[in-house]
Amino acid sequence: MVEPKENNPVPPAEAARRIPPLLQDLHSAAESLRRSLAQLEQDGRAYEHYLLQPSFARHAALQLEGSFERPFALAGALFSSLSYGEGAGSDARNTLQIPGLLCVPAATIDLATHLNETKLNFARAVKAFRESLKKRPAHEQDRRLRDLFAEAGSPRLHLRQCYRQILLCPERPDALAVSWIKARKSIRKVSVDWCERRLVQMDPQGVDPGIQYQRQLLAGLHRNQHDNLRQVQVQSRPNLQVAEIFRGDEGERYHQVGYAAMPVLVVSDESRQLPEYSRVGHEPPEGRRRQRRDLSLDRAPFLPALRVHLRHGE
């Protein structure tokens, strides 16, 4: 898809027309991958799998109504989950996560590659639509985008789950290195516009009284406090890091695949077994994280849904 030049933005109506067919492509590609993975459960010769079961992954399996006894079908359900679940709430920070490795045939890798490309095209179209409305307030941009999703038949679309890429090993490595990376904490400055946009994403229909109250607090914030908003960000869970190892005449070469919030798909050979890989505990090791204290921040959050605090006087 050709992206518009900045000096020649796409009109809102044209940008809006691009989204529904791409959304349909997204659901179609996700469904094709889901069916491919589910079919592997029926194969007489099983493909090897290694799915970890920390508490957050068990929670995700319950939300998906899946089972670790059927790992490929469970992964397919995760990859095709593009909307908020009825019991998952409307918090845009919440994404279902099941880390691990799945050995799959090349045809399944191709379907996952196509889904990743479709996700990128969809994300670009959403970005273009927002940019076509950049002179409008953030809450209006989000409302019009949500209305567009509803008209296309996906009123509860979860954008983070629509955007995140599936990690792939399309070239079979000699080995895989797997390790837990502990959670981190950060404090960053955020704008009023950013906060408003995120609150609208959490409650696009405007029916959550808690979110609406926080929007009122934000609207009533004095202008001289607009530069004092700080988000205290603590990763809710550690990440599973996966790296490929290739061995050759010149020694071992490592390639970082990424952080595996969803199963990494590894292309199979005739054995249908995963390459040699390291194993870790199902639960991440408990580490003593140093507590960062910023005495300039109010102890109670100003916007609890966003973990946003107000910074008081110097």
Image: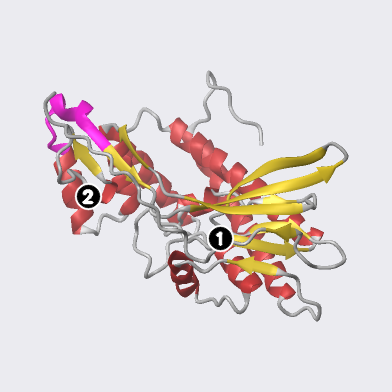
Q: Circle 1 sits on which residue?
A: 99
Q: Which residues are magenta?
A: 219-230
Extreme residue toward the top, this view:
7
**Residue hosting label 2:** 304
Question: Can residue 144 be found in the magenta stretch?
Answer: no
Q: Callout 2: few (<14), some (14-19), or many (20+) C-alpha neighbours within 10 Å?
A: few
Residue at the (57%, 68%) spot, across then down: 77
Residue 31 at what x, y percent from top left?
Answer: 64, 64
Q: Up-down: is 176 above or below 272? A: above
Q: Tell which of 263 and 186 is nearer to you.
A: 186
Question: For residue 216, what is the image quadrant?
Answer: top left
- Name the residue type under label 1: Pro
Would residue 313 appear left or right of 249 to someone viewing this image? left
Residue 23 place in picture, x, y as percent: 57, 52
Task: Using the image as rendered, state which of residue 67 and residue 110 is in the foreground.
Answer: 67
CA neighbours of label 1 inside 10 A, class few (<14), some (14 to 19), many (20+): many
Identity, as a three-letter code, of the amino acid under mark 2? Pro
Residue 169 drawn at (x, y percent): 73, 51
Looking at the rendered image, the quarter that the N terminus falls into is: top right
**Whole-percent x, y for residue 92 in the image:** 38, 52
Residue name at image x 38 percent, y 54 percent: 236
Q: CA distance from mark 1 to mark 2?
A: 28 Å
- Asked if residue 125 can be seen in this view, the reply is yes
* Horizontal side of residue 28 vs 183, given as left or right: right
- When the figure is inspected, residue 279 is found, relative to residue 290, above or below; the finding is below
Label annotation for residue 211 = none
- In the image, is 231 to the left or to the right of 165? left
